[in-house]
Image (spheres, rainbow, N blue to C red):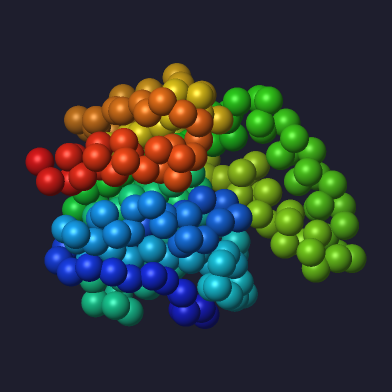
Amino acid sequence: MDIKHFFLEKGRGEALILLHGNGESSDYFQGQMDEFARYYRVLAIDTRGHGKTPRGEAPFTIRQFADDLLGFMDAHQIGKAHLLGFSDGGNIAMVFAMKHPGRVNRLILNGANLDAKGVKRSVQIPIEMGYRIASMFARMSKSAKQNAEMLGLMVNDPNVLPEELRGIQAKTLVVAGTKDMIKEEHTRLIARNIPDARLAFIKGNHFVANKCPHTFNRIVLEFLKE
């Protein structure tokens, strides 16, 4: 692998890997690390090109990030882990669970989406406009290229078909905010197509783990420990 991930680690026991959203870092999970570390070995990873993890030369896509996750687990001798992904991190976890079912214990998808159509148009339209503008200047500006890559993740990825989710074998919890940027019917579509998935809505927006950590942590731990 052409990169080495930066990550935060705390606790002992079964591995629980936390995957942040677009343009963020492992710091997003400050409200989860201590609580989850009481029961698990928690590892919060900076995705390729995010936080303190270098960009590298590989493609900047959700599927590449899922391949990176496999490399991370192999490098740290983690045979199997619980995965908790938020937003694009949820998309990474979803793709990973489809490709490597034997490496996932339990799966928590928070604010994930199958494609750009799952995002409310009031949010998605500015993203698409920003992506087009950044792409125009990408060859002339390093910052524009970086911006185009970030926005491109929300325009071009992950493009998963609902029926593909039926290949997920891990027990799964699908979580979203009641006022999430992901359409409620889209979140329900994801849960409906993953065999025996649980579905939970938390009062709040897309960032419920950060804004409502006590409720979020309780729901996640109840699912992991049952």
Horizontal arrangement in the rendering, residue 189 relative to residue 115 (left or right): left
Front residue of this view, candidates 191 and 226: 226
**Residue ID at (50%, 35%):** 206
Name, please, the residue furthest toward the left: 226
Residue 146 position, x and y percent, is 72, 62
Horizontal arrangement in the rendering, residue 34 relative to residue 133 (left or right): left
Question: Would you identify the image quadrant in which residue 176 lies?
Answer: top left
* Residue 32 in view: yes
Horizontal arrangement in the rendering, residue 49 relative to residue 216 (left or right): right
Residue 65 position, x and y percent, is 48, 61
Front residue of this view, candidates 64 and 224: 224
Vertical side of 97 occupied by 226: above or below? above
**Residue ID at (35%, 34%):** 175
Vertical side of 83 occupied by 141: above or below? below
Q: Quadrant of the C terminus?
A: top left
* Residue 93 in view: no
All told, the count of numbered labels is: 0
Residue 127 position, x and y percent, is 71, 39
Horizontal arrangement in the rendering, residue 165 relative to residue 125 (left or right): left
Residue 164 position, x and y percent, is 36, 38
Question: Would you identify the image quadrant in which residue 139 lies?
Answer: bottom right
**Residue ID at (81%, 53%):** 135
Front residue of this view, candidates 15 and 153: 15
